Structures are given as structure tokens and as C-alpha cells.
Image (cartoon, helix red, strand yellow):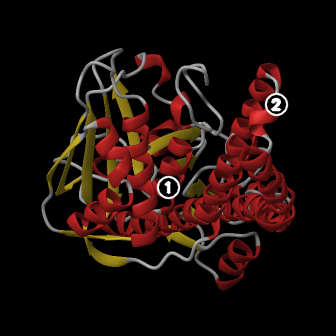
């Protein structure tokens, strides 16, 4: 609220009377403005209307208090300022009526009672303060309402944009479903025929081919297998978007054992060792997590060092975001932190985000086989769990994948 002192306009043609009023009211913290005539008072009021009360003498030369009050009341901005007449002559009912008719709210007979004057002035100044408080609150309310209206308009515009985006997303999902259908049926059917006839040629006619023909035929077989792997990986990637999110309290040891069994031949071929240090069950979508770990282990098998036995270490623990010291996590929320580390060929640190992109490869297909979708599937599965995945590595020093799944 306002800190400035309340202003009072004192109107009297005699300086001693103005001084007397200020002496009486001096200890109440008011700010006084003096006018020595009716015209002087009007001039002051035209410049400033923020007066709590006007104390005006009636008998003044040229323009008396009655005339001055009537002119003040003609202004819309000033007509609500209370006027108290101060006079020695308001001793008849006609004279008093004229005072009220001209716009006064009260009058006092001279000589003035200091206590009564203080009391009356205090009533009107307190009323002024309360009125100003209400006005300021009303202005604040109006400003707040204007902000709310603007915010509602912005929300309405955002809702329209979101609805448009949702319709677009629905259309894209329909296209994705159509693509999945084509991938699983229309594309695989001619591929199966190519493989069938290729196998027939391989069994019965391969020895009859020239060396150059065999080389070209081997390329056909390789490309056919690549096409099948690509279709299967694309289907797996698309399913991670549409799979039902049914969480179960699951033992990670069980998941890893199932994955190791599924990849037993690949693990044996690389003479790989998988070490686990897991603590407690976690809430996950089991089917998706099997895919996640299969892709991570396959990635390590694929990018292992030729002369160094592959070792994979998988650890897990439950902790709060604050204890995990990661700015991307909510400090007081619980997470399962899964650390997946290998001693493979690694990669340059600047590729830590690129490796999660669809069809992103850091090496030539002639050196390291694959479709470039495996880690994209891993990231999509983590996102379907509302989690975060981060990769760190150095060339020939292995790679570490840190996964944070909210619990």
C-alpha cells in the first residue's frame, strides 16, 4: 500500500489561521498544502486530486467557501473529496443548510476544538486510506484478470496446436501401422521366394556356376540376408512405439539369464564373459527389457576387440536422483541405475549421441556388420520406460551405457 503521507488541503485567506490548523494536526503525520483563496484552491486541485480532505474557511474575499465548494463539486474527479467548513458565523439553520447544499460534509464553529478537529479529520483520512487500498486492490485484481484472460487465450491457442499435432500424430501412427503390415507381409513374402529359389540354386546348381557367377550369387545371398535382418530390426523398432506398457516387478537376473540363453552361440563364439552385480527387483516392461539387453550384448559382441577376450559387466542399484548425481534426474525420485560396461573397441566421445540414431553407423559395413538400428531400439525402450540412457567411451577402451529407470 501507499507509503506517502496523507495530503490535506487547507484553505483560508489568513496566514495565522493556516498556521493554527497545522499546529493542531502536526503530530498526526499529514502533508499540508496551503491555499490563501478560493481561486488558489481550485488551481491546486486542478493539478492534483489526491487529497484526503479539504478544510476550508467560509468567509474569504472575491470567492467565498460556498462558491469554491460548488465549483469543486462540478468536477467528477473532485466531487468525492470531503469538505469541512470552518467558520464563526454558521449559527442559523439557513446558513448551515447552504453549507451542506454547496457540498460540505461537515462544519465546525470557531474557535475550533483541537480534539474534535483531530477526531473528524482522522475519520475522513482513515476512510480515504481504506478507499485507496480498495482501489489499489481493484487495480491489482484487474491486472491479474487481464493476465488470466491472456493466459487463457494462449492456452486455447496451444490447445488448438496440440490438437492439430495429435491429429497429425494419429495419422503418422496409422501410416506406421500400414508400414508395419507391409514390412511383415508384403515385403517378406517376395523375400521368402528369393531365399527359397536361392537355396534351390545353392543346393543343385551352385557347382555349375562359373567362379564369377558364384561370386555374384554369394553377393545375392548376402544381400538377401541383410534385407531380412533390416526388416526384422525395423519391425522391432516400430513395436517399441506401440507395445502395451504393462510394468512388472521383475528380477534382472532372470532377464539376463534368458538373454544369455538366447545368445549362447554368439557368446560362445566370442568367448565372452558376462559378469553381473545386481541388487533387487525393479518395475519394468519385461518383454522390452529382454530386447534392450539383447541389443546391448549383441552390440558388445559385434564391436569386441579381436585380440582381447570380451568382458561385459552389468550392475544395478536403486537410489534417488540426488544420490546418483545426475542433473537430468528428479532429486527425490527413486531410480534403478543400470550400468552396462564392456572392453570392446569403443568410440570417440563426440559420437555419444549419434550412436543412438536410426541407421547411424560409426564403422564401414565391410568391417563390422549390422543394420544400425540396435542402439536406436535400446534408446526407444528406455524412453518407453520414461528413463534416460547415456553413453561414454574412448577408442579401444570399451563403452559404458548408464541407464536410469524411474521406480
Which is more toward the observer, 16 or 347?
Answer: 347
Residue appearing at x 69%, y 72% in the figure: 99
Placement of the C terminus among the 4 image quadrants: bottom left
- Asked if residue 398 lies left or right of residue 52, the reply is left
Label 2 environment density (alpha carbons within 10 Å; few <14, some 14–19, many ≥20): some
Residue 359's spot in the image, x, y percent? 65, 35
Q: Residue tagged by mark 2?
A: 209
Q: Is residue 378 left or right of residue 346?
A: right
SS of the residue under disc 2: loop
Q: Position of residue 296 (x, y in %)?
A: 40, 45
User: In this orientation, does residue 70 appear?
Assistant: no
Please tell me which of labels 2 and 1 falls first in the chain.
2
**Above/below status of 111 relative to 364:** below
The mark closer to the camera, 2 or 1, is: 2
- Horizontal and vertical percent position of residue 312: 24, 40
User: To which quarter of the image does residue 47 belong?
Assistant: top right
Residue 137 in sight here: yes
Where is mark 1, residue-wise? 383
Q: Residue at x 53, y 44 (%)?
A: 374
Element type at marker 1?
helix
Foreground residue, 343 or 80? Answer: 343
Of 128 and 68, which appears nearest the observer? 128
- Residue 125 location (% of width, % of height): 46, 62
Q: Quadrant of residue 239?
A: bottom right
Q: Nearer the viewer, residue 216 or 293?
A: 216
Answer few, some or many: residues within 10 Å of disc 1's Cα (few below 14, many 20 plus, some between 14 and 19).
some
What is the tally of numbered marks visible in this picture?
2
Amino acid at each position: 500500500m501507499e507509503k506517502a503521507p496523507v495530503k490535506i488541503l487547507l484553505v483560508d485567506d489568513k496566514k495565522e489561521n493556516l498556521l493554527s490548523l497545522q499546529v493542531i494536526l502536526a503530530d498526526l503525520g499529514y502533508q499540508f498544502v496551503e491555499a490563501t483563496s478560493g481561486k488558489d484552491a481550485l488551481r491546486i486541485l486542478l493539478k492534483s486530486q489526491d487529497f484526503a480532505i479539504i478544510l476550508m474557511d467560509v468567509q474569504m474575499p472575491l470567492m467565498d467557501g460556498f462558491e469554491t465548494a460548488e465549483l469543486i463539486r462540478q468536477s467528477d474527479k473532485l466531487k468525492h473529496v470531503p469538505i469541512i467548513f470552518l467558520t464563526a458565523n454558521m449559527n442559523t439553520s439557513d446558513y448551515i443548510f447552504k453549507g451542506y447544499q454547496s457540498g460540505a460534509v461537515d462544519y465546525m464553529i470557531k474557535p475550533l476544538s483541537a480534539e474534535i478537529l483531530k477526531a473528524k479529520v482522522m475519520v475522513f483520512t482513515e476512510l480515504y486510506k481504506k478507499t485507496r487500498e480498495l482501489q489499489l486492490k481493484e487495480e491489482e485484481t484487474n491486472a491479474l484478470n487481464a493476465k488470466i484472460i491472456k493466459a487463457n487465450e494462449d492456452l486455447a491457442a496451444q490447445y488448438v496446436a496440440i490438437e492439430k499435432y495429435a491429429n497429425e500424430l494419429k495419422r503418422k501412427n496409422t501410416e506406421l501401422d500400414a508400414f508395419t503390415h507391409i514390412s511383415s507381409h508384403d515385403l517378406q513374402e517376395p523375400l521368402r521366394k528369393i531365399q527359397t529359389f536361392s537355396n534351390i540354386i545353392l543346393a543343385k546348381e551352385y557347382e555349375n556356376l562359373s567362379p564369377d557367377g558364384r561370386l555374384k550369387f554369394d553377393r545375392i545371398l548376402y544381400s538377401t540376408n541383410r534385407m531380412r535382418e533390416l526388416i526384422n530390426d525395423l519391425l522391432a523398432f516400430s513395436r517399441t512405439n506401440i507395445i502395451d506398457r504393462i510394468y512388472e516387478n521383475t528380477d534382472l537376473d532372470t532377464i539376463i539369464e534368458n538373454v544369455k540363453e538366447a545368445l549362447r552361440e554368439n557368446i560362445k563364439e566370442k568367448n565372452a564373459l558376462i559378469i553381473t552385480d545386481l541388487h533387487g527387483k525393479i518395475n519394468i516392461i519385461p518383454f522390452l527389457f529382454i530386447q534392450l539387453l539383447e541389443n546391448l550384448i549383441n552390440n558388445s559382441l559385434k564391436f569386441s576387440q579381436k585380440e582381447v577376450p570380451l568382458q561385459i559387466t552389468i550392475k544395478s542399484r536403486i537410489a534417488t536422483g540426488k544420490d546418483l548425481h545426475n542433473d537430468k534426474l528428479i532429486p527425490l525420485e527413486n531410480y534403478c541405475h543400470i550400468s552396462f560396461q564392456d572392453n570392446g573397441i569403443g568410440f570417440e566421445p563426440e559420437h555419444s549421441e549419434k550412436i543412438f540414431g536410426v541407421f547411424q553407423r560409426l564403422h564401414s559395413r565391410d568391417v563390422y556388420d549390422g543394420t544400425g538400428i540396435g542402439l536406436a531400439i535400446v534408446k526407444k525402450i528406455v524412453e518407453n520406460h520414461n528413463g534416460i540412457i547415456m553413453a561414454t567411451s574412448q577408442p579401444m577402451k570399451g563403452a559404458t551405457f548408464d541407464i536410469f529407470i524411474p521406480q
